[in-house]
Amino acid sequence: MLMNATEVMKRLPHRYPFLLVDGIESFTENESIVGIKNVTINEPFFQGHFPGHPIMPGVLIVEAMAQVGGLFASLNDEIGEDKVTYFTGIDKVKFRKPVVPGDVLRMELNLLKCRRGIYQFSGKAYVGETLVTEAELKATFVDREG
């Protein structure tokens, strides 16, 4: 593992229960990043989504992908702790299969372009070899308040 959960927390402002990245498996400068989320039955969203049939909400899979994108930008440009990542857009989202407790979600993001501080990624999330979600994501950095 290239980056564990403790190292992820040094670069992302998110904390439990909204930190959705447990580690980074690989990073290639100006190209790609692969992040991991270990999905457990203890996730708070499973209490209501859905009782007796727990499924990770698709919007949280997309959020996890966005957090991996923020880590890419942080690593790629060495963005300091005085900045925070803001998600600025999502396009072409497709939810293909449900994600359930016990799954390991592997998120692969490829940089499509970066112009004027706006990063655009093509992202795919897998469980094993099965594609579960795909999307195009956009993010930027802003000064951290206070």
Image (cartoon, helix red, strand yellow):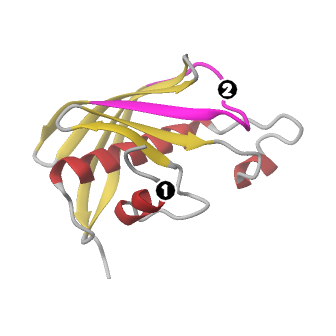
Amino acid found under the numbered disc labelled 1? Ala
| Residue range (magenta) | 93-110
Q: Position of residue 74 (x, y in %)?
A: 26, 53
The residue at which mark 2 appears reads as 98
Task: Tell me which corner region of the image, top left, top right, bottom left or bottom right, holds residue 122.
Answer: top left
Residue at image coords 73%, 38%: 101
Residue at image coords 61%, 42%: 38
**Magenta-drawn stretch contains 100:** yes
The residue at which mark 1 appears reads as 5
Amino acid found under the numbered disc labelled 2? Pro
Q: Can you say whether 122 is above or below 5 in the image?
A: above
Task: Tell me which corner region of the image, top left, top right, bottom left or bottom right, holds residue 27.
Answer: top left
Q: Can you say whether 61 is above or below 122 in the image?
A: below
In front of the other: 79 or 134: 79
Of badges 2 and 1, the one in the foreground is: 1
Residue 100 image label: none
Residue at image coords 30%, 76%: 145
User: What secondary structure is found at the residue carrying circle 1?
Assistant: helix
**Magenta-drawn stretch contains 141:** no
User: What secondary structure is found at the residue carrying circle 2?
Assistant: loop
Q: Can you say whether 125 is above or below 119 in the image?
A: above
In front of the other: 1 or 127: 1
Q: Position of residue 32 (x, y in %)?
A: 28, 32
Q: Quadrant of the N terminus?
A: top left
Q: Quadrant of the C terminus?
A: bottom left
Q: Position of residue 84 (x, y in %)?
A: 31, 63
Task: Tell me which corner region of the image, top left, top right, bottom left or bottom right, holds residue 113.
Answer: top left
Residue at image coords 56%, 57%: 18
**Local crowd size for mark 1, using a 10 Å CA cut-off: few (<14), some (14–19), many (≥20):** some
Q: Earlier in the sequence, mark 2 or mark 1?
A: 1
